Image: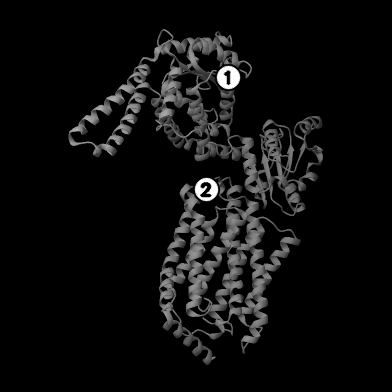
Amino acid sequence: MNLALIGINHRTALLDVREKLWFSDAELPPTLTQLKNQFFTECFIVSTCNRTELYGIMDVQKLQGNSESIVKKAGQALVEAKSASGTVLPQHLYRSFGCKAAAHLFKVASGADSMVIGDIQILNQIKTHFNLATAEGTVGTFLNRLVQTALRVGKRSRAETTISEGAVSVSYAAVELASKIFSNLSEKRVLLIGAGETGELAAKNLVGRGVASLSIANRTRSKAEELVQELGGAVVEYDHVEDALPGVDVLITSVSSPQYILAQDQLRRVMKARSNAPLLVIDIGVPRNVHPDVNKLENVFLHDVDSLSRIVDQNLARRKAALAPVNAIVLEELIGMRQWFESLQVNPTISDLHAYFETVRSDEVKKHINRFSEQDRELVDLVTKRIVNKLLHLPTTNLKNGNGESAEERHKKIHIIRGLFGLHKNEPAEDDNEVGRSQ
Amino acid sequence: MQQRRVQSSQRRDVAHLINDRGSRVRTIILILNYTLPVLYFATVWSYAKAFFRNSAIAKWVKTPLLTFTIVCHFLYLTARTILFDHPPITNICEILSVLAFTTALSYLAIEYITKVESTGYFVLIISFFFQLLSTLLIHEISNVNPVLRNNLLGFHVTSALLGYSAFAISAVYGFLYIMLYHHIKSNRFGVIYDNLPNLEKLERMATVSVLTGFILLTVAIIVGIVWLPRAFEHFSYFDPKLVGTVIIWLMYGIGLVAKQSIGWQGRKIMVLAIVGFAVTMLSLTVVNVFLSGFHNFY
């Protein structure tokens, strides 16, 4: 495979370096065209906040020099396209070739290489950027196949393993906890006290899950009003929070206050007023806002930052455990990809073509051999063999010589020949495009 | 009475003479009797594998396997009814088998309605043990109380048994609720936390089970009170089984009213579901084993 990869990611460079190499959707097309003209027969770029990676098919015959130097030059061109040569240094960039590069893309698509393992967004980003490259006309048979396979790897990893299961941030852990207690969040009301960032995020996620209502209380009322503008809901007076509590099912507190803002007695009264209906209290404040004894009350579930982190840690561990099955999927798809690629080479195609003609010939000879006399039979075999060889002679030499065509053109030709004679035994059915589209 | 018994045994003899159907049915019963516990074990095992080990094969196979088991069990009970010419409620082993069947059937209905598939292990293990006991202890009774051949009685007993299995299931869900409740409270986020449905759903499942059980028991009591005085010469309203059942009925009734009017919910009402079932079991044992009345046949 003449596939090459050069890229930068969260493992090789810090944010202030890799942000210099981030391409917006508008910047991608011209860069792709320029890179394709200079170095590749096909190329495409994935660029997210955690990585920028350039995948290209090199035409070594056309360009003088070895693949290593071509990729280095392409890397330089990539850096120069963003005028980042001062910040992005050679040691920030990694390179790989052939199957290793393909395996890397598959791993990226599966989420195994993400900063937060199992991140779902990366698959959409690959798809968007691939569509950009397709529109720009910088991808062909090979990269198309590669990216469709990568998208399938991503889809399969999510469906068949636990790589993207469970909440992996404290604010999502709060939502997960709420859905372990309540079955229908759209009937539940949320109260947020304070305007700490994590608390705000947790409230935002709950609103995203479609809770019935959100109210916000804050010591400085204007801050609460600002949040209401953003998230919707209503403002509750900070001093009258206890009156609002009986109507609330999920309470999030993130106030910076040296003392507890809610004591056991207060919540006992609240529980009585709400006829003991279950109440989830998420205390994100440090130091804690709610007295720990509150957890002793019946049907009150009090969770602080530590217990939310425990959920996060556990989910991360589970995602890590999915790495082995994900690698198995990557390997499986890589083998399929390799088989397809090999089938596009000249020599296997020639031998497959000869084998196909030989099968047809020998079958026909066998069928009719009894019509010939004993002494003629050997001759019949010889003559038919000669005919077949003569017929195949010109196509075979033409295929072998190639007449100075590019690798891309040759692949296309082989693809057509294989299709014409039904030699596509190594190629899976053409459902890959659908897989990509349904993502 | 004597006459009826003679008649029915004659009927059976005739059937036997005509096409030897009886012996074939007998073979089916014999085979199913030993197959059922194995099937229940396989079902429980696949539900356990699905819950604790997250096994994909077990998840795929468990519900079809349960359905197959229930169909076999139904065939078994039908075959018994045909061969012995009475509903399979004439001795404690038959009752156990029917209880296993009704529990499994109720569970399947719950799974179908709620789409919650993870709790099967905890419920079906009851069916397995009931059927196992029944298989090991069952023997044919030649002398069946003729009252028990009545079909209305079949209805009376079936609704009572379905009611009790609904109570059993509610206790299981109550138990699961309490387990998950304590796991969440004490920050234990393990298999139980991952795989059980949420607390609100568990509470609803337990409540619906209690309600179903209560309705079925009401039916059983009404049919009993209307029909029993006509069937038995020694009928008494102070029969221990009748009194016991009414007490159980009252207890669950009060619980349901309390939930509705006082608004008891969460842990408290789930503890009640468990206690209620424990009292029910205790009362049934005491009535059937230690006390006697017109109502006892075993």
Q: What amino acid type is highlighted by mark number 1?
A: Leu
Q: Where is residue A32? Give x, y as percent.
A: 56, 15
Q: Camera-side residue: B12 or B70?
A: B12
Question: In the rendered view, would you say A73 is above or below B279?
Answer: above
Q: How many marks?
A: 2
Whether residue B283 can be seen here: yes
Q: Amino acid at mark 2?
A: Val
Q: Quadrant of residue A370?
A: top left
Label ID, residue A234: none
The quarter of the picture where the N terminus of chain A appears is top left
Give A108 or A349, whichever is nearer the viewer: A349
Q: Which residue is labeled 2 in the image?
A: B191
| Residue A15, disc | 1
Residue drawn at x 34%, y 24% as measured from the top left: A350
Question: Which chain letter matches label 2?
Answer: B
Residue B146: x and y in percent read 54, 85
In the displayed structure, would residue A275 be above or below residue A122? below
Residue A111 shows up from this direction: no
- Residue plotted at (74% across, 34% down): A194
